[in-house]
């Protein structure tokens, strides 16, 4: 769930400003030329020279990250930019971010930079506020094109123009499991979809009482109930139909009730609506609709189910004292592809967009798309739980094993990344009918065709 973007670059500092830039970099009077301190400062700030001397300039940033503990890693990650350019970054977080940002833009009180959680929101902001979201500058464009998979630039673009740079990422194509349970039974990690189904059938055969099931799942999430089921459909759409058809589905080039989409929903049903496969430790198929997504994987810890499909961020839900890792209580494997020649990856992320056409704002946006920022952010997040898709992120800086695994998957040359489809669709669909109809698909047993037909009818007219 999430998308948005930012971008922009800056003019290379002229030689007349070089001394001032160095002073800003060192935090005071420049060290004597040729000194060890001067050489260290030059090396530290070399990657920042194109941003110019920004001494005395201030850039405001607005995000949904409000708590001091969560905001601190972001604030700390801006320090290299401040030290090496002389600029000051003023941070503001609010839990009412998504409601406040459009109001502030219309009132002429927009922040310089904002983190946008969904591409769909970026599209709305651009189209509803003509000229107020600023296109990315040359340095931001260069950084995104150099350090990110091409798909990320597309997610930060609206109507062919690039606005927002990626600042965070997550991988959704994961299946969580217990290494010990697998080892005790001699089960191996499936590498293809058919192997995963064969493993599911083996688990059913090995547990004739039905007390232990291959899968556990839950899609309850308050007002957002249903979204975990949409992730299943998106992952399977990528695997059954490939990225091109997935893109056509997301942008409505093909109808939501196209036969290809219905086939993907049906394939998801071979697991989620199979009483022999689900819902381990929780009940039958219908309990998926009433089980909180935060608790849906926990039966693995009790030995009541073997597998749970959920994103990398689920690592935070296992609870205190549960070791997450290859040799831990729980671990994750890549949701296998149907075609061995393809490695589709479903994920999400956040983007930084700008609302002021000033050099220091464009420079900061470009910094957010740079390896320097991604690595500074990793350094500033000592407990892990954060990830960037920047190709130059040092994997050794990632603390949590699942973050490292996620990055390995994202940076795999064979990986074909696609953003969460419901985050790209119009909100009436992606955060409305799609969620509701998938809930009815589980809770009421509504047919895949009827679900797809209802969602198609809800698609806004152009």
Image: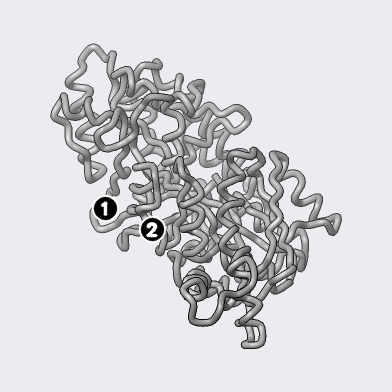
Q: Residues within 10 Å of mark 1 (few under 14, many from 20)?
A: some
Residue ID at (45%, 29%): 317
Q: Which residue does the numbered mark 1 point to in the structure image?
A: 339
Look at 66% across and 49% down and name the residue there.
63
Image point 41% across, 22% down: which residue?
A: 285
Looking at the image, which residue is at 59% across and 64% down? Answer: 81
Q: Which mark's residue is nearer the viewer, 2 or 1? A: 2
Q: Please identify the quarter of the rendering in which residue 129 is found.
A: bottom right
Find disc 2 in the rendering and name its residue. 394
Q: Residue furthest bottom?
A: 15
CB within 8 Å, label 2 to label 1: no
227 vs 130, left or right, is left
Q: Secondary structure at mark 1?
A: loop
Residue 252 location (% of width, % of height): 55, 55
Give residue 335's quadrant in the image: top left
**388 w.r.t. 7: above or below:** above
**x%, y% of residue 428?**
65, 44
Does residue 401 appear in this view? yes
What secondary structure is marked by label 2?
A: loop
Residue 264 occupies which quadrant of the picture?
Answer: top left
Q: Is residue 51 visible?
A: no
């Amino acid at each position: 769930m999430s998308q948005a973007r930012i971008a922009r670059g800056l003019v290379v500092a002229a030689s007349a400003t070089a001394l001032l830039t160095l002073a800003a970099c060192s935090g005071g009077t420049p060290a004597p030329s040729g000194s060890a301190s001067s050489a260290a400062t030059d090396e530290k700030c070399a990657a920042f020279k194109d941003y110019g001397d920004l001494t005395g300039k201030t850039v405001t940033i607005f995000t949904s990250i409000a708590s001091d503990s969560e905001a601190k890693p972001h604030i700390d990650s801006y320090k290299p930019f401040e030290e090496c350019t002389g600029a000051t970054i003023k941070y503001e977080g609010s839990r009412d971010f998504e409601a406040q940002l459009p109001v502030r833009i219309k009132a002429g009180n927009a922040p310089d930079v904002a983190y946008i959680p969904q591409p769909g929101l970026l599209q709305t902001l651009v189209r509803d506020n003509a000229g107020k979201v600023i296109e990315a500058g040359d340095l931001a464009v260069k950084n995104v094109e150099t350090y990110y998979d091409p798909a990320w630039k597309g997610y930060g673009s609206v109507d062919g123009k690039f606005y927002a740079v990626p600042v965070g990422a997550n991988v959704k194509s994961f299946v969580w499991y217990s290494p010990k349970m697998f080892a005790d039974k001699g089960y191996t990690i499936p590498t293809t979809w058919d192997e995963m189904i064969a493993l599911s059938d083996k688990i059913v055969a090995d547990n004739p009482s039905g007390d232990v099931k291959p899968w556990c799942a839950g899609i309850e999430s308050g007002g957002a109930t249903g979204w975990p089921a949409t992730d299943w459909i998106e992952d399977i759409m990528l695997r059954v139909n490939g990225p091109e058809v997935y893109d056509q589905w997301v942008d409505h080039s093909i109808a939501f009730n196209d036969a290809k989409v219905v086939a993907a929903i049906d394939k998801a049903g071979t697991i989620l609506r199979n009483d022999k496969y689900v819902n381990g430790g929780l009940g039958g198929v219908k309990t998926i609709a009433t089980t909180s997504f935060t608790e849906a994987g926990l039966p693995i810890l009790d030995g009541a189910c073997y597998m749970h499909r959920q994103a990398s961020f689920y690592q935070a839900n296992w609870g205190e004292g549960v070791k997450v890792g290859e040799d831990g209580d729980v671990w994750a494997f890549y949701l296998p592809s149907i075609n061995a020649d393809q490695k589709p990856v479903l994920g999400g992320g956040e983007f930084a967009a700008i609302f002021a056409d000033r050099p220091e704002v464009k420079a900061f946006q470009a910094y957010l798309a740079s390896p320097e920022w991604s690595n500074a952010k990793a350094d500033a997040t000592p407990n892990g739980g954060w990830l960037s898709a920047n190709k130059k992120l040092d994997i050794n800086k990632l603390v949590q094993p699942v973050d490292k695994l996620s990055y390995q998957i994202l940076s795999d040359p064979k990986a074909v990344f696609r953003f969460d489809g419901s985050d790209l669709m119009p909100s009436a669909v992606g955060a409305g009918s799609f969620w509701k109809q998938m809930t009815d698909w589980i809770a009421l047993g509504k047919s895949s065709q009827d679900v797809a037909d209802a969602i198609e009818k809800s698609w806004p007219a152009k």
